[in-house]
Amino acid sequence: MNNESLNKNISFTLGQADSEKEISVNTRRLGLGIDAGGTYTDAVVFDFKSGRVLAKSKALTTKWKYSRGIMAAVDSLPEEYKASIDQISISTTLVTNAIVELNQRPVGLLLMPNGSQPPVDLKYQPMQIIHGRITIGGEITEEIDAEEIRNAVSHMISHFHVDAFAVSGYGGSVNPKLELQVKKIIREKSGMEVCCGHELSGSLNFSIRAVTAVLNAGVMPIMEEFLKEMEYSMSQAGIEAPLLVVRGDGGVMSEAYAREFPVQTALSGPAASMAGAMFLTGLEDAAVIDVGGTTSDIGFLNGGRVSVCENGARIGGWDTHVKAVDMLTSGLGGDSEIIFQRQVWILGPRRIAPVSQLFAMNDSKRRLLDSLDFARRKIGDWPDSTVPFQFLYRTGKTPDFEMTSREHAIYDSLEEGPLMIGQLMKRHGIGTWKMVKSARLESSYCVQRAGLTPTDLFHSEGLLSLWDKEFAESYQALVADTAGFSSADLARHIRSMISRSLGTVLLEKMLGGDIVQGSGLEHILNHGNRLIQLNPEITTPVIGLGAPASLMLGDAVSRLNGKLTLCENGDVANAVGAITSKVTVSCEARVAVTYAGSFRILGIEGEEDHFETLAEAEKCCIAALAKQIRSRGRKAGTSASDVTITIKSDVACSTEGSEVFIQRLYRAEISGTPDLV
C-alpha cells in the first residue's frame, strides 16, 4: 500500500495464512428455506449440489404465533427429505412487526451524553443520565459510577418493569470502553439482556445509535422466544440442523448472532426476496417487484448485491443505523381489499382474506351460502358502501384483553362460523356498519375480515386456481350488482387501478420521489398529453416475484415499455433467497490525527494508542480490524477468512492549496458459506 498520497480510496482483499484458518467442512446436502411473510409462509427444500428446489409449500402466516404457520408449511413438505436437511435459514417479519406495531418489550436506557442533558431529538422513557464522558476523539474525561448504575437498574426494573437495557454514550463508537463497563455492571445486577450503541453502528450520530440500541434491546426477548419455539418445533418435525436468520441486507447470521442483534433482521423478508430473485434469474442488475398478499415491495440488484440503505433504514417511524434493503413498499397486494364506497372504487391498502379462500378453507359452507342469499335480498339497503357484505370470522386465537360488551357480542356471534357485517348489524340492532366495533379483535388477529380482493377476480376469470372459483364468481357478482356494475366491468376497472398503482410506484422508485411527483407520474404513465408526447422505456430488467406477479405486473411494466422477467419458483423466491444467501459481516475503524500531530486508531477497543506515522497506525489498524472481523464472522456463522478492506480518506485543502489529512476510514467485510456447526 502506498501512503504517499493522503487522498487514498482503495479496496483490497486480505487473505489469512493457511495455518491460521478455521477449517470448516461444509458438505451440505439439503437446506430448508423459510419465509414467514405478511400473508403466507413459504418453505422450500433446496439441493445445494444441483442448485435446485426439490419441494415447496405454503401456509397462512399466523402472526400471533409465527411458529404455527411455519410448521404448517414445513409439515406439508415430503417427509423423505427432512432427515437429510443440513441447514435451516429463515426470514421473518417478526421484528419488523414488533417495531411497527409498538410491541417491543420495555427497555431502560442509560445515557452518557456530551454534557448534562440528552440530545433534544431523543425523546424516550425510561431514560437516565449517568456519569461517564468521552470526547468525540475518544478521550475519557469522566469515569462511570458503578453504584449509580446499580441503583438506576433497580429503579427501572421496579418502577417501569423493564425486560432489557440499552446503553449509549457520546463518543462510544470511537471508544466503546465505558459502554462495555456499564453493560457488564447491568448484566451482573439484573441478569437481563443489554445492548450497547457501538455494537450496532460505528456512526458518530449519538442519538440514532441510542434509538437503535433501544429497538434492539426491546426485541431481544421476542427473538429469544421465537428461536426457542423454532428449535423445539424443528426437533418435533425430525429436523436437526443449525438455524440461520436472514438479515435486512440480504445476508444470513447464526442463531446466536440473531439473539444478540435481532434488530438486524428487520426487513429481512424483502431482502430475502431480492436475493432469491438474483439466484433464480442469474441477473445481477435489475429492478425487483415482489407482489405479496399484503404489499408489493420494489428494490434493486446492483452488481450482484441487494441494494441497501447505507445510512440506515427507517422502521416504524424510527431512524436507525440498521443496514437494510433499500425498497419502496406499496400497500397493494393480491389480497388487498376492494370496496365500493360513496360511488368510488377503493383498492387497498388493507389486507383481507379473499372470499374464495374463506369458502375453500371453512367447514361452514352452508352458512356462507346463506350469507350470500341474505346479501342478495339486501342489495339497495346500504347504498353508500359494500362493507356490510364483508365477512368476519374467528382465527382461533383467543382475545388476551378485556373485551367490551359490543366486542363480546361480535365475538360470540362468530362462534358457529363466519357472518357478514350486515348480518351482525341486523342481529344486534346496529344502524350503520361503522358501529360494528371489530377493530381491536382484528388488529389482535382474533378475528379476520374477508371480502373481494384481486385474488378473487383472478379466480373468477380462471387465471388462478388456489381456492374456490364458484364462490368467488358469486360474490364478485354481488359486489358488482351493489355498485351497478357488471362483473366484467368491475374486473376491467380494478385491473386498470392495479396497473396504474404499481406503475406509479415503479416510476417513483426508479426516478426518485423528489424528482417526479403527483400528476407528473400520471403523465408519464399516460405517455404525455395533447401538448407533449412522453415515451418512457425501462432499460433495466424488471423481475416479478410472487404468485400474482404475472397477473398484476404485466400491464404496468408494458405501459413503461419495459420487459417483465418471471422465473420458475418465483412464488417462493423469499424462501429460496433465505437458503442460498451467505453470511456477510462488516465493521469499521478510523485513523485520525491528534492535536499533537500524531495518529491514533478509533473504533477498536484497546487500539487507541498514538503512532508517530500514518503508515504505522494504518498497519496496526488493518491487522486489528481483520482480527475483529474474522472473530465476528465466526460468531455470525462462517469460518471464511478472506477479508475485503476498503479505505477512504477525508482530506481538506489548505489556504495554500496543499492537502491536509483529517482521517482515514477503514471498512472491513467478510462473506462466506454458513458453517454446519
Image (tube, rainbow, N blue to C red):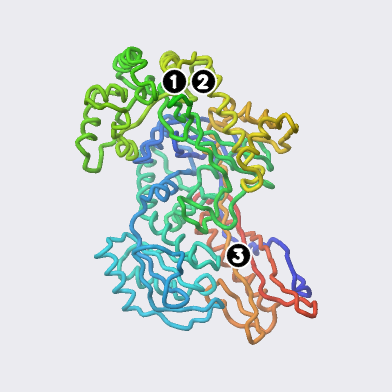
- 188 lies above or below 82: below
Looking at the image, can residue 367 be seen?
Answer: yes
The residue pinned by badge 2 equals: 458
Give whichever of discs 2 and 1 has the lower sequence position: 2
Residue at which label 1 appears: 467
Residue 607 pos. (x, y %): 57, 76
Q: Mark 3 belongs to which amino acid?
A: Glu
* Viewer-nearest of discs 2 and 1: 2
- Of 132 and 85, the residue lying toward us: 132
The quadrant holding residue 404 is top left
User: Mark 3: which secondary structure?
Assistant: helix
Callout 3 touching callout 1 (CB < 8 Å): no
Q: CA distance from mark 3 to mark 1?
A: 57 Å
Categorize mark 1 by other alpha carbons within 10 Å: few (<14), some (14-19), many (20+): some
Point out the tag, 3 or 2, that comes first from the N-terminus: 3
The kind of residue tagged 2 is Phe
